[in-house]
Each structure stands twice: as structure tokens, then as C-alpha cells.
Amino acid sequence: MGERTEYEEGEKAPNPGIYTEVGEARSFHTQVQNPKQIKMEKGDTFPEPSNKNRKWKKAEKARVH
């Protein structure tokens, strides 16, 4: 079983890195405009995203194909 890739407010970061907001629809047609990005260390708590329908995802995994 692999590591989760999306995180919600209040959860702990599993690894250090830069995390970005992603929308609830994962389609390339509905990209988040100007997503917030945050630098996290392992164990840091994720802050509240810009709106309730967004989650946090590690930046290198959030790229659009």
C-alpha cells in the first residue's frame, strides 16, 4: 500500500517539501488558479487552504500531464 498523496487541514506532513493546493476535481480542465504553495517539514501541520474544496498535495506530484 502506498503513501497518501492528498492532505487536509490539520493533518501532519509525512515528508519535507513544497506542497500546493489542488482542487476537488482532478481534471486538467479545472485547475486551481494561483494555488497557494507552502514549504513544510516532516510533522508540520497543514494550514487551512484558500477554500474548503481544496486539499494539499506535494508540488512535484501535482503537475498536470
Image (cartoon, grey):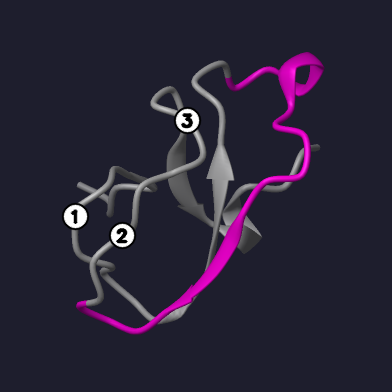
Give the distance between the C-alpha atoms of the residues marked 3 and 2, in whole angstroms.
Answer: 14 Å
Residue 42 falls inside the magenta stretch: yes
Residue 39 falls inside the magenta stretch: yes
Q: Residues within 10 Å of mark 2 (few under 14, many from 20)?
A: some
**Residue at horizontal 55 percent and vertical 45 percent from the top:** 21
Q: Is residue 17 above or below residue 25?
A: below
Give the residue number, with chain letter if any, for mark 2: 46
Q: Secondary structure at mark 1?
A: loop
Give the distance between the C-alpha atoms of the residues marked 3 and 1, in whole angstroms.
Answer: 16 Å
- Camera-near label (3 vs 1) is 3
Q: Position of residue 4 (x, y in %)?
A: 29, 47
Give the distance between the C-alpha atoms of the residues marked 1 and 2, in whole angstroms.
Answer: 6 Å
Magenta stretch, overall SS = loop
Q: Which mark is residue 11?
A: 1
Residues in magenta, as a range: 26-43
Give the residue number, with chain letter if any, for mark 3: 51
Give yes or no for contact between labels 3 and 2 (Cβ–Cβ under 8 Å).
Answer: no
Please identify the quarter of the rendering in which residue 59 is found.
bottom right
* Comes first in the chain, label 3 or label 2: 2
- Which residue type does callout 1 highlight? Glu
Q: Nearer the viewer, residue 2 or 57?
A: 57
- Camera-near label (3 vs 2) is 3
